[in-house]
């Protein structure tokens, strides 16, 4: 007698495999988006203790930490000079007393005495969406000026060369003034303790979306902010507020955010029609 066997034909098996492949293809982007959302939230949370430490520093010394220290300006991105930066000065306020004690400010940040600290891969200053090169790079930068220029004492941002800024110097208000943001790192990054373009940036180039890994900018070039998050970058303001600013933000809005004393009505609060009228005047 003939027995009837149950099973799949080759065609049916191929159809099932194709359906599973399509479902996986649809699910992967959603999973990646969820992972990036988690990384973005973690990045924002890492800016919170930095913001609190900056404010605590002002409460202690009656001014915010200087962006960088050197005998003279402008600052160049090279391993020569003092270059102790704002991040190193808030280490104890970020509950890192051991790191703070190991920083010797009587010598250059590049001196062999400071090498163990400079080479640290410090996770509190690293965005989880950023690649791990260089390992000792900082993803977070202080803002020194609204437009592209070398880092110097006459900058209009909060973190400038040698000259500390107090709350009363931020005449536009802490809520309207950007203090810290993110950057795209290059292989020639000098490290998280270096007060060069490694930890200081401006917004002259808008929000960068390409890291230019193969570019070799001039030593005096600083560069703009940017991030590895899709569509924008985190910006921390003097009030402690942290906003995710879209990459399509008008450059004039970004520049006004960084300038601590321009005195103009905040462009970010103005209607699009008002901004258009100003652009043609």
Image (cartoon, rainbow, N blue to C red):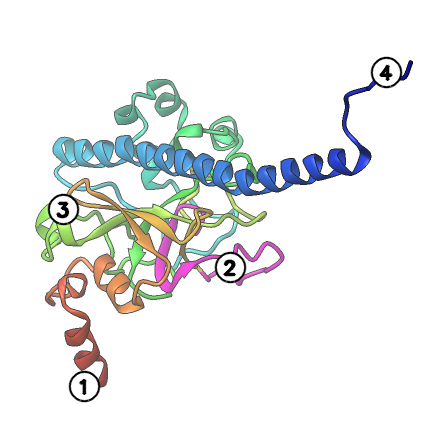
Q: CA distance from mark 4 to mark 1?
A: 89 Å
Q: Which residue is mark 3?
A: 166
Whole-percent x, y for residue 105 in the image = 37, 33
Q: Are marks 3 and 4 in contact (CB under 8 Å)?
A: no
- Seen from the viewer's position, the closer of residues 32 and 267 is 32
Q: Are marks 2 and 1 in contact (CB under 8 Å)?
A: no
- Seen from the viewer's position, the closer of residues 270 and 28 is 28
Q: Which residue is mark 2?
A: 219
The mark lying in front, picked from 2 and 1, is 1
- Seen from the viewer's position, the closer of residues 139 and 84 is 139
| Residue pictured at 40% horizontal, 33% vertical | 38
- Please tell me which of labels 4 and 1 falls first in the chain: 4
- Please tell me which of labels 4 and 2 falls first in the chain: 4
Whole-percent x, y for residue 114 in the image = 47, 30
The mark lying in front, picked from 3 and 1, is 1
- Please tell me which of labels 2 and 1 falls first in the chain: 2
| Residue pictured at 64% horizontal, 39% vertical | 19
């Amino acid at each position: 007698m003939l027995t009837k066997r149950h099973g799949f034909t080759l065609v049916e098996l191929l159809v099932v495999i194709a359906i599973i492949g399509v479902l996986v293809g649809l699910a992967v982007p959603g999973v990646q988006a969820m992972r990036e959302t988690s990384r973005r939230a973690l990045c924002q949370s890492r800016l919170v203790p930095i913001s609190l430490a900056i404010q605590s520093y002002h409460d202690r010394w009656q001014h915010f930490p200087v962006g960088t220290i050197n005998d003279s300006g402008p600052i160049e991105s090279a391993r020569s000079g003092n270059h102790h930066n704002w991040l190193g000065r808030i280490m104890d306020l970020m509950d890192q007393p051991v790191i703070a004690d190991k920083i010797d400010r009587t010598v250059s940040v590049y001196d062999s005495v400071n090498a163990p600290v400079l080479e640290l891969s410090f996770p509190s200053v690293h965005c989880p969406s950023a690649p791990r090169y260089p390992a000792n790079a900082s993803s977070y930068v202080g803002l020194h000026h609204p437009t592209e220029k070398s880092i110097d004492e006459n900058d209009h941002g909060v973190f400038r060369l040698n000259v500390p800024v107090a709350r009363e110097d931020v005449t536009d208000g802490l809520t309207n003034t950007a203090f810290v943001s993110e950057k795209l790192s290059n292989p020639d990054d000098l490290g998280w303790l270096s007060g060069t373009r490694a930890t200081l940036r401006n917004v002259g180039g808008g929000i960068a979306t390409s890291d230019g890994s193969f570019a070799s900018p001039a030593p005096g070039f600083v560069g703009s902010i940017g991030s590895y998050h899709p569509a924008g970058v985190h910006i921390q303001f003097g009030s402690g507020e942290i906003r995710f600013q879209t990459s399509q933000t008008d450059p004039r809005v970004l520049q006004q955010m960084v300038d601590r004393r321009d005195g103009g009505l905040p462009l970010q609060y103005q209607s699009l029609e008002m901004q258009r009228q100003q652009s043609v005047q």
